[in-house]
């Protein structure tokens, strides 16, 4: 039997639809209420917060690096300036796959694998988020055009104009002024992130490093409006940076060139100081190098060639070169002996060509094997007699020797603004005990008296010791900065002057130095005779390899780089000191024959005018004529 067909209940269906409509309406109303409440919360309650976020997406604060201070020589010649340059920068966060972008840069600019490796190293270095990193400096017009054409392939890459440090005089002041270089990861962690915002370079060596705070300046800021891709649309507000302070150095380019010419391509060092002020007039370390490639990043091969060169052009011989001072310190030892009361200017020592300690058979040889007979202090300095100074050193003893030589600046840093300077070594009993766990022997004191043995000095220390002789003990630290933005730098830790029991002791030491240059048997009389002024000087020879007892130095049997170093120190005019000079010629052998002519050329360049005559301000006073009665 078929099932009955059920009739549709329209009333029931209507109720169901109404219920659903009501539920739907309630749901819609609730959702609308939630939406309205959320909109109210976001647009009213959190209005300030989201307005700030929106502004931050549109407005950015960008640092403006300050212009680095300029560096001049004493005559106003620019030594370090800032040169406009176009650089290629990459912002890693905007570049996406930045290694691929670097590949495109290398392809577009037709560069090699070395440049690609250098770019990657620069990008990987620590830097602040969203900070553009310069990968290539000093773009040519052709390179800029290639980048512009391929800009669609280079996200995050821009060409920006900036000032780059430049050293127009190249090698002349590389060791004194130094250079700037890119900030590395270690430096980035130590630097103030605010002060160095937008700055990519920092002083690495020399004056550039020592006076970094003064040269750097203060960073500025600008508020810019950007689009969604980070492009700057307009500048809303700008606070200009404060440029770094300009520094005028005491160095003189003409004297520097004259000193370099005097070295004539030989390895060595020259320091010239103005005794009364401590101003360094010339500072030469040869061979030198061009500092400009270090600013933008020197290539691997170029740096390796400098680093591995047997002549060590990167090595600052003036500040870091350690050499036995040899006989250059004999005038200082003589003054010390007088003040200690162990000798007088008239004290005589008989020289048979050697010296022997009482009760010992070992002979300490004089350079003149035949001996000079009976010698006093003036003759001993003039002839550089070793026997006299063996005897004097023995009378003084190591303790007094150490005390006096330290007062002359040996074994300590003497400069005011040369952070690279090494202290050298003035040995003592305590030093040897700590270093070798051995007692001090009398024979070691003897060889210290002639500037040999453990003693190690820098050319700068010898120049300062000579300046102390010229000023009769007045201590003024040698320094390179003459003025900083017009301000004269001061010494925060001045050293005490050398005060002797009798000021006439200085006269005895200086008299001997004058005899070296102008005495009848002076070791450098040939140089002194050719001078238009009187010079006080002293030669020295620093042994590179030891010679056995009884053997004689034979240059033909010694390799060129194992031959003795030639040293000479002097100041002039002797009666009105205006310049003190120390010269070291590596493997030059003869202080009087090789280094002394170099000293004279440097002094001539400072004291003589263009016609070769002594400048009027340095000429000795002329005695007034007395009218006849």
Image: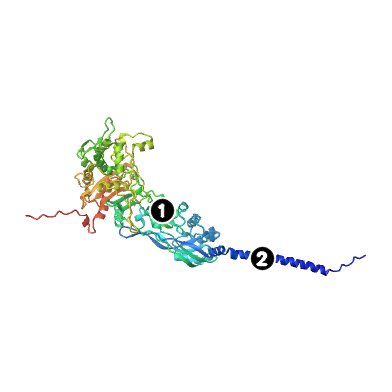
In this view, the residue farthest toward the right is: 1
Dot 2 or dot 1, earlier in sequence:
2
In this view, the residue farthest toward the front is: 45
x%, y% of residue 1? 93, 65
In this view, the residue farthest toward the left is: 629
Residue 507 vertical placement versus 256 (above, below): above
Between the residue at mark 2 and the residue at mark 1, the CA separation in whole angstroms equals: 65 Å
x%, y% of residue 189? 47, 52
Foreground residue, 401 or 375?
A: 401
Q: Secondary structure at mark 1?
A: loop
Regarding residue 259, the answer to whether it shows in the image is: yes
Side of 342 relative to 243 (left or right)? left
x%, y% of residue 41? 61, 63
Query: Mark 1 and mark 2 in contact (Cβ < 8 Å)?
Result: no
Q: Residues within 10 Å of mark 1 (few under 14, many from 20)?
A: some
At x 22% / y 59%, what residue is drawn? 611
Side of 357 relative to 84 (left or right)? left
Side of 101 relative to 382 (left or right)? right
For label 2, the residue is 33
Residue 146 vertical placement versus 180 (above, below): below
Q: Which mark is residue 204?
A: 1
Foreground residue, 184 or 65?
A: 65
At x 90% / y 66%, what residue is drawn? 4
Instruction: Name the front one of labels 2 and 1.
Output: 2
Q: Residues within 10 Å of mark 2 (few under 14, many from 20)?
A: few
């Amino acid at each position: 039997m078929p099932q009955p067909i059920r009739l549709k209940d329209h009333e029931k269906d209507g109720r169901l639809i109404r219920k659903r409509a009501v539920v739907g309406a309630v749901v819609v109303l609730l959702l609308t209420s939630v939406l309205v409440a959320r909109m109210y919360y976001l647009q009213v309650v959190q209005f300030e917060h989201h307005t700030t976020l929106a502004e931050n997406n549109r407005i950015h604060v960008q640092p403006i690096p300050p212009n680095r201070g300029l560096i001049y020589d004493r005559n106003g010649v620019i030594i370090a300036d800032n040169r406009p340059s176009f650089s290629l920068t990459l912002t890693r966060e905007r570049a996406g796959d930045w290694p691929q972008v670097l590949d495109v840069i290398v392809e577009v600019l037709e560069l090699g694998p070395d440049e690609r490796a250098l770019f990657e190293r620069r990008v990987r270095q620590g830097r602040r988020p969203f900070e553009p990193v310069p990968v290539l400096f000093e773009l040519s017009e052709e390179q800029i055009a290639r980048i512009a054409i391929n800009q669609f392939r280079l996200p995050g890459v821009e060409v920006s104009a900036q000032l780059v440090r430049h050293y127009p005089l190249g090698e002349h002041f590389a060791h004194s002024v130094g250079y700037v270089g890119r900030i590395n990861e270690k430096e980035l962690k130590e630097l103030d992130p605010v002060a160095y915002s937008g700055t990519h370079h920092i002083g690495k060596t020399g004056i550039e490093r020592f006076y970094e705070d003064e040269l750097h300046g203060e960073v500025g800021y600008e508020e810019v409006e950007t689009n969604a891709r980070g492009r700057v649309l307009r500048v809303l507000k700008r606070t200009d940076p404060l440029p770094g302070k300009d520094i005028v150095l005491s160095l003189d380019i003409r004297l520097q060139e004259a000193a370099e010419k005097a070295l004539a391509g030989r390895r060595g060092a020259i320091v010239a100081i103005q005794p009364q002020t401590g101003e360094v007039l010339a500072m030469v370390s040869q061979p030198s190098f061009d500092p400009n490639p270090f600013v933008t990043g020197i290539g691997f091969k170029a740096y390796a060639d400098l680093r591995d060169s047997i002549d060590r052009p990167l090595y600052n011989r003036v500040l870091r070169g350690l050499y036995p001072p040899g006989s250059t310190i004999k005038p200082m030892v003589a003054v010390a002996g007088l003040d200690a009361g162990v000798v007088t200017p008239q004290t005589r020592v008989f020289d048979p060509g050697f010296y022997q300690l009482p009760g010992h058979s070992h002979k300490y040889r004089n350079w003149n094997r035949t001996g000079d007979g009976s010698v006093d202090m003036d003759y001993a300095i003039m002839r550089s007699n070793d026997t006299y100074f063996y005897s004097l050193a023995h009378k003084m003893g190591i303790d007094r020797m150490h005390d006096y030589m330290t007062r002359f600046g040996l074994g300590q840093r003497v400069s005011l603004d040369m952070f690279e300077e090494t202290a050298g070594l003035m040995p003592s009993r305590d030093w040897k005990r700590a270093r070798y766990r051995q007692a001090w022997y009398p024979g070691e004191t003897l060889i210290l008296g002639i500037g040999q043995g453990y003693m190690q000095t820098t050319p700068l220390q010898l120049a300062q010791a000579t300046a102390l002789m010229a000023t009769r003990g007045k201590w003024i630290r040698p320094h390179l900065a003459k003025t900083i933005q017009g301000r004269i730098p001061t010494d925060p830790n001045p050293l005490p002057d050398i005060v002797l029991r009798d000021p006439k002791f200085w006269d005895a030491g200086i008299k001997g130095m004058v005899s070296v240059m102008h005495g009848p048997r002076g070791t450098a009389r040939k140089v002194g005779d050719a001078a238009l002024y009187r010079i006080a000087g002293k030669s020295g020879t620093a042994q590179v390899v030891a010679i056995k007892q009884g053997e004689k130095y034979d240059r033909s049997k010694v390799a060129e780089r194992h031959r003795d170093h030639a040293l000479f120190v002097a100041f002039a005019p002797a009666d009105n000191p205006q310049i003190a000079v120390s010269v070291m010629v590596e493997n030059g052998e003869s202080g009087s024959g090789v280094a002394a002519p170099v000293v004279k050329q440097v002094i001539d360049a400072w004291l003589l005018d263009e016609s070769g005559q002594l400048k009027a301000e340095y000429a000795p006073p002329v005695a007034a004529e007395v009218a006849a009665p």
